[in-house]
Image (cartoon, rainbow, N blue to C red):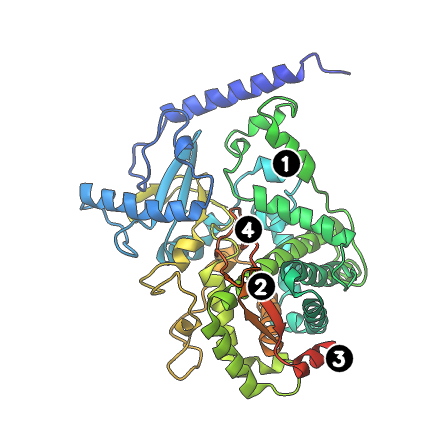
Amino acid sequence: MSSLLSPELVSASAVTVGALAILIAYARRDSRPIPPGPRSLPIIGNLLNMPSQEQWLVYQEWSRKYGSLSFSTCPDRAFTQHGTTGSDIVHMNVFGTDILVVNSAEAASALFGHKSAIYSDRPRMPMLGELIGLGWHFGFMPHGEDWRIHRKIFAQEFTATAVEGYQEQELKWTKIFLQNLIATPQNFMQHIQHMASGLALEISFGLEVQPSGQPDPFIAAATQAVEALTETGLFGTYLVDFLPSLKYFPAWLPFGKFRRQANKWRISPRRDYVPSIGSKILMSDEASNETAVRQATAAMFANGSAATVSALTTFILAMRLYPEVQAKARREIEQVVSGRLPSYSDEASLPYITAIIREIGRWNPVVPLSFPHKLTTDDNYNGYYLKAGSVVFPNAWAILHDPTVYPEPHIFKPERFLTNDGKLNPNVKDPEAPWGFGRRICPGRKMANSTMFITIASILATFEITAAIDDNGRVIKPSGEYGSGMLRYPKPFKCNIKPRSREAAALISED
């Protein structure tokens, strides 16, 4: 039976109900002290204050600005200061949704670590989860039974022992990457994407894509998924995240652009392949939920490939901008590796390479504003009231660029993780902020570090990364700029990549 109500009337009714709910919430707003933040307006709150680009930098600055104001006007207010003078947490409200941004490691540990039971949920994200169809993604899944099933799958497949079992595939794809780099070094970004996607597809789904670096339909489809995550994974990028009723608006309306984008990106993870993590679990006694296995392996691919592409491109950029770091790393490798490519057994003898990997994640993290958490019950922090239902962002960028913890934070300096005699410094903790927080920390971080180590060590052992020269003989210096989205990638840049020697090229060419 067809509905008597037109889509336009349904949409208008949904918006009216949403507006009434906001009015009621505003009238009932709590008077208890909340963390500092920009002044809000009636109904729309801080909508006009919300940054659309590089939000992590804006929130870091708000931490200093509004923390200073709070301290000067309310000197008896107890709150932690970090950096110079600032508030650990800043507060906003948009259409009745409270937003908290955590800007220090201390606050992140206190909330996401010690109170993980109430900070492990995810907010509803209609654009990503419902309109695009990525609600199945483990990283954005609400805390509950489905999430626990997915988490168990990740946990058993990414233990230290399990990760060792993937080394053969990692070595294979590292070799393919090096060979493609010799053939067309100017396409290094494309080769990084190809390697990361090929490795992730093979491990997750058992798919073997073409090694030549040519366009591949599986990689193209997977890249679309990562693009959708990048564009829509940051809560609040689209107004529908605050007003879910907008999802009923027809795509043909002038302000229905978000619906048209959602239709373009809409994804359904309905395929699995052999032999792989997915097929192995499906054939095991633990295959109680086939859908969960398929969804978890799809999330493994999306997370793994995106993080690897960003981190390795950042590595190339850092080696171009900091040639002294590249030279020091090469000297370390030469003392350990001779007449062969690096292997996993060399890792303990290459602490500077490990320091480089840690500094990559700290200097330009893949996810500078970490995945949003949702507070499930009322809480308090340093005298401030934190309301249940709040969307809570860990600002990984601010945490990793705190000058009191990392002096000269904008400089790429692996030495900060080493002792004076070149060993890893146990007093300088491996930064966890790039991997998320609490129960939501990335379960694939061991795998990511393993891939990073063998790829970076192999590049440094066989290639030299120097400045590109334009047609007039002038050095082309990369801007060092990054795109703005949930997942952060360096903007395209040029550099010169060539084998260090004939011997190095021969090692790469060997089967």
- The mark that comes first in sequence, 3 or 1, is 1
- The residue that mark 1 highlights is 130
| Secondary structure state at the residue bearing disc 4 | loop
Position of 366 with respect to 29 (left or right) is: right
User: Earlier along the polypeptide chain: callout 4 or callout 2?
Assistant: 2
Tag 3 near tag 1, CB within 8 Å: no
In the rendered structure, which disc, 3 or 2, sits on the residue that comes first in sequence? Answer: 2
Query: Could you tell me how far apart the alpha carbons at marks 3 and 2 are, in whole angstroms?
Result: 23 Å
Residue identified by numbered label 2: 312
Residue 46 placement: quadrant: top left
Mark 1 lies on a secondary structure that is helix
Whole-angstrom CA distance, mark 4 to mark 1, is 20 Å
Q: Which residue is mark 4?
A: 487
Labelled pair 4, 2 in contact (Cβ < 8 Å): no
* Label drawn at residue 510: 3
Q: Position of residue 174 (x, y in %)?
A: 68, 70
Question: Callout 4, which amino acid?
Answer: Leu
- Earlier in the chain: of badge 3 and badge 4, it is 4
Q: CA distance from mark 4 to mark 2?
A: 14 Å
Residue 467 appears in the rendering? yes
- Tell me the mark number nearer the camera, choosing from 3 and 4: 3
